């Protein structure tokens, strides 16, 4: 939703996977019969039935099928066949659609991408030969205010200052291929003010213009007050549960009357509340072989602390329970790949959280299939029916009774073609564990380090910010002076210095046998942020220290970088951040102990 999306958009790490050996010979291609399977068609359960698939299309569903053409047969006894899953809120770029299908997610609803990036992917979704990745529908560019949420990612996007711009904005998005209109809104007196927002009048006009063009209007909200105003403005769907308060009767009635659906994205809400994925996901032996290094790093990456507490997550869950009991349609979405989430894999966690929030397993399955099919104009996706492409997932057991069974995938078909799942490729690029010792004492003629790539300036300019930084080696004193200004222009501005642990791109250093990062520092700012970057993720793990105007020796515990993989460290960074200010600090005698 915010921080984790920032640098990743610009610096996408590609999905490196290896085919699972000898699997291809186990299943047929586009002509086959499935026998005696429990079928969940997106709406109803058929306890034991057969399906005939011919040319990739479902031709027949009945209790007993005569296999006259002697097609290959699959025994579905003890298994459940369900539609390919739909993630109703994701951000798609790079290999996202490949990662998604590998976990049985065959459709993703993208809620903000640049048209030039997403358009080629949209064009592939109606090609029946597109059998190796998920389909995508997109809002393209979201509607936001100047400096509002969505402007911080470094892209030059159109913004709205008033309702008169709404008509042109919507028409331009449709011209660029928008399947629906995504809007960011925050009430002026709402409890959270993370960034500027469009006015209520602008929101109302955007919804009106979307509906004139027969497009859904969905709105990103952060709080209960904004949710009520958005529903009154006529939106079709609310995105994100909120953690300032529990949904009340008034909101439930408003949503009922206006037929508004709800995409709670509990996985990212958990991350915002500093609740990391637990062993139910990261330690799931059924899933672990299908989580690559990039996904694992994203799942382990903590969200920047925006003031939410773990206890706040219960409000988001209670809102889901309240609205679900009021008859509001719930859709399953993850907001992947924000910190704490990953494409494909996280939808299984979202289903678990929805059940935890009060949905039955069957209702949660509908949230990830037919509810999206009914809410959005996505064609047959999210259902299984005669005369449509066979996009299906076969799992062991009965996920309509135990939602954890969605993870036990035995086969995936996309447009009738069996998809060969891929397992994570072993990563051999990590260098041996480093020994304790000095990194830099700045007594040399240049800004050099005793190992690694060296130290260099870093700031938020790489993703559209305006902060400045200057780095100067004081040879006479043997110290490094860093100065600059943290400026407005990026939601989480920063400026300082960065140390790359290896000289080869893509490699990481193993610091797992070490205890502390030590250095001397002084400065005119109260807080210096120490950030650790790990391979596969561009989301830092952060600790802060208090500076004084006099030299002090600081010892930062590596274990304090919560959930970081210390065996895969790519960089360490010292920056001024968050507070807009001019700054000066000096650093010396950097070491690992």
Image (tube, rainbow, N blue to C red):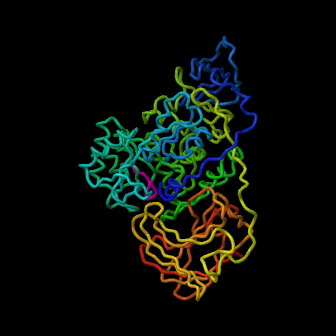
Residue 276: image location, x then y, percent: 60, 57
Count of numbered badges drawn on the protein: 0
Relative to 46, say whether 430 is above or below.
Answer: below
Residue 260: image location, x then y, percent: 38, 41
Residue 258 appears anywhere in the view: yes
Say which of 129 and 226 sits in front.
129
In magenta, the rendered stretch is: 242-248
> Is residue 332 found left or right of 404 in the rendered image?
left
- Residue 247 highlighted magenta (yes or no): yes
Relative to 500, say whether 437 is above or below.
Answer: below
Say which of 512 and 74 sits in front.
512
Residue 183: image location, x then y, percent: 37, 48
Residue at the image point whose x is 31% and y is 36% from the top: 213
Residue 38: image location, x then y, percent: 64, 27
- Residue 572 highlighted magenta (yes or no): no
Residue 355 appears anywhere in the view: no
Relative to 65, say whether 282 is above or below.
Answer: below
Q: Residue furthest front?
A: 445
Residue at the image point whose x is 58% and y is 83% from the top: 479
Q: Residue furthest left?
A: 164
Q: Quadrant of the C terminus?
A: bottom right
> Is residue 198 found left or right of 376 in the rendered image?
left
- SS majority, magenta: loop
């Amino acid at each position: 939703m915010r921080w984790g999306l920032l640098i990743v958009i610009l610096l996408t790490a590609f999905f490196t996977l290896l085919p699972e050996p000898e699997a291809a010979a186990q299943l047929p291609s586009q002509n086959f019969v499935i026998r005696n399977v429990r079928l969940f068609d997106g709406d109803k359960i058929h306890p034991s039935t057969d399906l005939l698939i011919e040319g990739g299309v479902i031709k027949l569903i009945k209790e007993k099928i005569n296999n006259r053409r002697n097609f290959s047969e699959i025994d579905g006894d003890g298994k459940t066949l369900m539609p390919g899953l739909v993630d109703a809120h994701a951000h798609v770029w790079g290999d996202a659609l490949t990662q998604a299908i590998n976990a049985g997610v065959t459709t993703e609803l993208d809620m903000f991408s640049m048209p030039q990036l997403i358009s080629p992917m949209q064009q592939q979704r109606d090609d029946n030969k597109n059998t190796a990745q998920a389909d995508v529908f997109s809002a393209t560019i979201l509607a936001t205010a100047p400096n509002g949420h969505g402007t911080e990612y470094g892209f030059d996007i159109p913004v709205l200052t008033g309702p008169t711009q709404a008509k042109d904005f919507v028409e331009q998005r449709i011209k660029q291929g928008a399947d629906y209109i995504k809007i960011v809104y925050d009430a002026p007196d709402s409890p959270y003010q993370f960034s500027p927002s469009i006015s209520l009048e602008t929101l109302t006009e955007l919804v009106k213009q979307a509906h004139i063009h027969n497009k859904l209007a969905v709105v990103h909200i952060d709080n209960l007050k904004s949710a009520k105003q958005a529903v009154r403005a006529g939106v079709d769907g609310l995105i994100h549960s909120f953690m300032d308060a529990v949904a009340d009767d008034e909101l439930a009635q408003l949503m009922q009357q206006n037929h508004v659906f709800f995409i709670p994205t509990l996985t990212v809400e958990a991350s915002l509340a500093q609740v990391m994925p637990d062993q139910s996901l990261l330690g799931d032996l059924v899933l672990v072989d299908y989580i690559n290094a990039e996904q694992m790093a994203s799942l382990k990456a903590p969200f920047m602390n925006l003031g939410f507490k773990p206890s706040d997550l219960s409000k988001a869950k209670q809102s889901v329970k309240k609205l679900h009991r009021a008859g509001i349609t719930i859709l399953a979405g993850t907001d992947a790949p924000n910190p704490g989430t990953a494409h494909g894999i996280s939808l299984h966690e979202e289903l678990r959280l929805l059940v935890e929030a009060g949905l039955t397993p069957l209702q949660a399955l509908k949230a990830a299939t037919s509810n999206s099919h009914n809410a959005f104009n996505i064609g047959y996706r999210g259902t299984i029916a005669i005369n449509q492409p066979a996009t299906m997932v076969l799992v062991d057991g009965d996920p309509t009774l135990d939602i954890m069974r969605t993870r036990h995938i035995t086969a995936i078909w996309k447009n009738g073609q069996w998809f060969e799942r891929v397992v994570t490729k072993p990563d051999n690029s990590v260098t041996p564990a480093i020994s304790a010792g000095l990194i830099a004492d700045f007594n040399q003629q240049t800004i050099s380090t005793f190992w690694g790539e060296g130290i260099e300036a870093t700031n938020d300019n790489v993703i559209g910010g305006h902060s400045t930084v200057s780095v100067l080696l004081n040879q006479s004193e043997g110290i490094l002076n860093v100065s600059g200004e943290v400026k407005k222009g990026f939601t989480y501005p920063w400026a300082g210095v960065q140390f790359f642990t290896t000289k080869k791109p893509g490699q990481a250093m193993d610091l797992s046998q070490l205890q502390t990062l030590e250095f001397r520092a002084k400065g005119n700012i109260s807080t210096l942020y120490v950030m650790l970057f790990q391979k596969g993720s561009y989301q830092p793990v952060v600790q802060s220290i208090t500076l004084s105007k006099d030299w002090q020796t600081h010892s930062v515990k590596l274990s304090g970088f919560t959930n970081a993989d210390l065996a895969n460290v790519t960089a360490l960074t010292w920056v001024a951040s968050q507070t807009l200010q001019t700054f000066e600090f000096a650093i010396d005698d950097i070491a690992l102990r």
